Amino acid sequence: MPKISVGTYVQGSGSGSGSSMDEIRNPLSVWRNTVRVRPNEYAVIKFMGEGGDLSRYHNIPGMTRDGARFTKYEYCARLNLGTEGQQVREDSCTFCVSADDAISNTTERFLAWAFHYGTFHSAQNPRLDRDGQEPWDEIRRGQKMFYRETVRKPQLFQASFTLYKNLESKREMMDSLTDRNFDYSCMRVTDRTTYSLDYSDTSLTNDYASEIQAVERDLPDIESIAAKLITEIDVPQFGEDGKDSYRMNSQTPQQVANEESAFTNMTASQTKDEEIND
Ligand SMILES: [Zn+2]
């Protein structure tokens, strides 16, 4: 079985530099590797492990070029502390000193690793004119037609504190969050967009349970991602049949093979060092 090169990542400064446009364009950005659903869509996910990160964020209001409002969540460097009471990130927080209460106040948000099987969209792939894009499968569910995008990758799942509490109450009723799959859906009623998590009844030909377990322990640290100490991640996409068919997002099979032989050499020399030390 090939080595699963999970979660190679880029260390950031923690200052959260880089514009939103860069985040959207860069296929390795945390933004691009986060499960996102729009109104009347849902994603099928499985939580990877029981853990997650709960941190405080400032809510920064923003507006897109066509006038739609959105909120950007900025990690608070001052209030988020590690297990020994020290700041997770060493810089000072510029949002805490804002004169605008709406910005200086913080709310808690949840971040966790989830395996994203795919998303049921309400419309066909809008990027079909671009290279490498494929049409999504048309699937009828009940009275509705959906377009199924297959993802099969570990991705980040983020939730408001309300949705997190909802998840916690589900956790209390189950032995483990990882026993079941969830539908993560979005609804827009009048002017309010709400997100919810429900037990999924989507049947999967392969749930990749053992592959997910193998990958789980090697994923980059979730708290470091929340703190933007890790800004880029490279996660594997699972092949159709699961076993032995992982493919890196951005590396050719040759690059992966080179990396694997480099890893083997490194392991060999490390073993030698240990013998010397003994
Ligand atoms: Zn702050």
Image (spheres, rainbow, N blue to C red):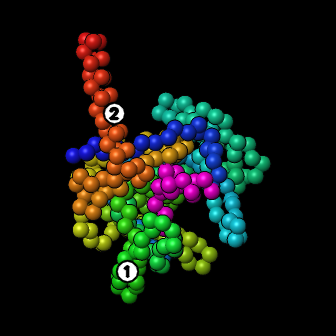
Query: Which disc number belongs to residue 57?
Result: none
Tell me where residue 166 appears, x and y as whole percent: 43, 61
Q: Amino acid at mark 2?
A: Ala
Question: Could you say which is closer to the camera, residue 64 or residue 263?
Answer: 263
Residue found farthest to the right: 99
Q: In the image, ligand 1 is in what quadrant?
A: top right
Tell me where residue 34 appears, x and y as whole percent: 48, 57
Tell me where residue 206 appears, x and y as whole percent: 24, 64
Residue assigned mark 1: 138
Residue shown at 63% from the left, 48% from the top: 18
In the picture, measured across the screen, residue 119 lies left or right of residue 38, that is: left
Q: Considering the whole magenta stretch, tell me its main secondary structure.
A: loop
Q: Which marked residue is nearer to the observer: mark 2 or mark 1?
A: 2
- The quarter of the image holding the C terminus is top left
- The secondary structure type at the circle numbered 2 is helix
Question: Could you say which is closer to the camera, residue 174 or residue 269?
Answer: 269
Are the residues tagged 2 and 1 within 8 Å (C-beta)? no
Task: Give the mark nearer the N terminus: 2 vs 1.
Answer: 1
Q: Would residue 175 be visible to someone looking at this image? A: no
**Does the magenta run of residues contain 25?**
yes
Residue assigned mark 2: 262
In the picture, measured across the screen, residue 253 lies left or right of residue 13, that is: left
Residue shown at 68% from the left, 65% from the top: 64
- Label 1 neighbourhood size at 10 Å, few (<14), some (14-19), many (20+)? some
Residue shown at 50% from the left, 55% from the top: 27
In the image, the segment drawn in magenta is 21-39
Image quarter of residue 267: top left
Image quarter of residue 165: bottom left
Q: Amino acid at mark 1?
A: Glu
**Does the magenta run of residues contain 134?**
no
